Image (cartoon, rainbow, N blue to C red):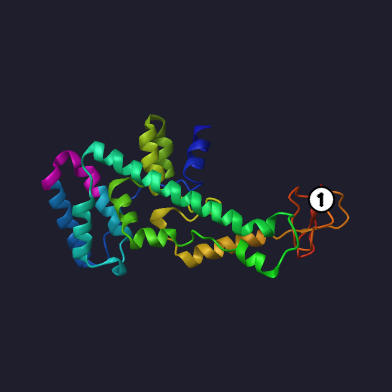
């Protein structure tokens, strides 16, 4: 049972064994990462070594040339690494508060955009399908990276594998689970399985995921069902989910 709950908590990702982060392809970035680790260790002490090495490696793995120079990487890590536990807890709370606001607003917007395509509230217009396929939060991950917020999360909070969560999760505190959930978070549209922050799925790809999701809900109800009101138009779903047929001609049964 715990295995199932742990898998659901962070998405049903494959069970994999944690492996060391691959070294940066750019020698200059790799050198900057080494300098950054040494500087942070000198500043914060041996007690922070594991967090420093893990956090810097996590940022290196997601850093791209477009994100800035190796010097910019180094400056960001030196400025944003949080060693004090109270400050770290406050940083986690800030991420939780603000991302909850963003996700909630995007979810609310997406539900409004799709309502004429999924509810029986009047004749459907050709544009309704396009609105339903639009994910207002598709570019959130891109924006989190462009603003460097994603890198701050990766620098300070752990990426975990399913094996790690299953093996050690029973001893984790609520805060430890919240930290793991932060960097493993999904998109705002139906918990889009995009791998979370670290996977860095581009916005256009997420829009295609949203379109596929909307297309899967474009359900053609039959006209003979007593559950369909007279106002239901072709290509509409009754809010009571009556049996019907898909555009391909395949019909559902009770």
Q: Main secondary structure of the magenta part?
A: helix
Task: Spot the residue most to the left.
Answer: 42
Residue 203: x and y, percent? 46, 64
Residue 114 falls left or right of residue 137 = right
Residue 45 magenta-drawn? yes
Q: Quadrant of residue 66?
A: bottom left
Task: Spot the residue most to the top.
Answer: 171
Q: Please report the residue visible at 32 percent of the width from the left and 50 percent of the height from the top.
A: 153
Residue that mark 1 sits on: 253
Residue 232 magenta-drawn? no
Residue span colored magenta: 42-53
Q: Quadrant of residue 67?
A: bottom left
Q: Please report the residue visible at 12 percent of the width from the left and 46 percent of the height from the top.
A: 43
Q: Element type at marker 1?
A: loop
Res. 251 visible in picture: yes
Residue 49: x and y, percent? 19, 43
Residue 15: x and y, percent? 46, 46
Residue 96 falls left or right of residue 114 = left
Q: Please report the residue visible at 32 percent of the width from the left and 45 percent of the height from the top.
A: 157
Residue 96: x and y, percent? 39, 44
Res. 192 visible in picture: no
Residue 36 falls left or right of residue 129 = left
Q: Tag count in the figure? A: 1
Residue 225 falls left or right of residue 2 = right
* Between 81 and 226, the one nearer to me in the picture: 226
Q: Please report the residue visible at 35 percent of the width from the left and 41 percent of the height from the top.
A: 93
* Between 113 and 14, the one nearer to me in the picture: 113
């Amino acid at each position: 049972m715990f295995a199932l709950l742990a898998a659901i908590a962070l998405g049903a990702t494959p069970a994999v064994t944690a492996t060391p982060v691959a070294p940066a392809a750019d020698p200059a970035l790799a050198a900057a990462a080494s300098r950054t680790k040494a500087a942070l260790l000198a500043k914060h002490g041996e007690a922070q070594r594991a967090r420093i090495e893990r956090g810097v490696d996590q940022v290196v793995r997601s850093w791209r040339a477009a994100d800035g120079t190796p010097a910019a990487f180094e400056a960001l890590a030196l400025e944003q690494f949080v060693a004090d536990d109270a400050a770290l807890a406050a940083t986690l709370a800030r991420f939780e508060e603000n991302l909850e606001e963003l996700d909630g607003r995007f979810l609310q917007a997406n539900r409004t955009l799709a309502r004429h395509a999924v509810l029986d509230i009047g004749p459907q217009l050709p544009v309704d399908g396009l609105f339903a396929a639009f994910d207002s939060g598709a570019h959130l991950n891109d924006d989190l990276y462009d603003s460097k917020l994603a890198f701050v999360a990766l620098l300070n909070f752990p990426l975990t594998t399913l094996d790690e969560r299953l093996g050690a999760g029973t001893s984790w505190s609520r805060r430890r689970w919240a930290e793991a959930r932060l960097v493993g978070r999904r998109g705002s549209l139906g918990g889009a399985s995009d791998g979370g922050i670290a996977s860095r799925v581009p916005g256009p790809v997420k829009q295609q995921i949203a379109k596929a999701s909307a297309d899967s809900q474009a359900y053609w109800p039959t006209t003979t069902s007593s559950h369909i009101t007279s106002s239901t138009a072709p290509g509409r779903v009754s809010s009571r989910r009556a049996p019907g047929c898909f555009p391909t001609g395949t019909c559902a049964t009770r």
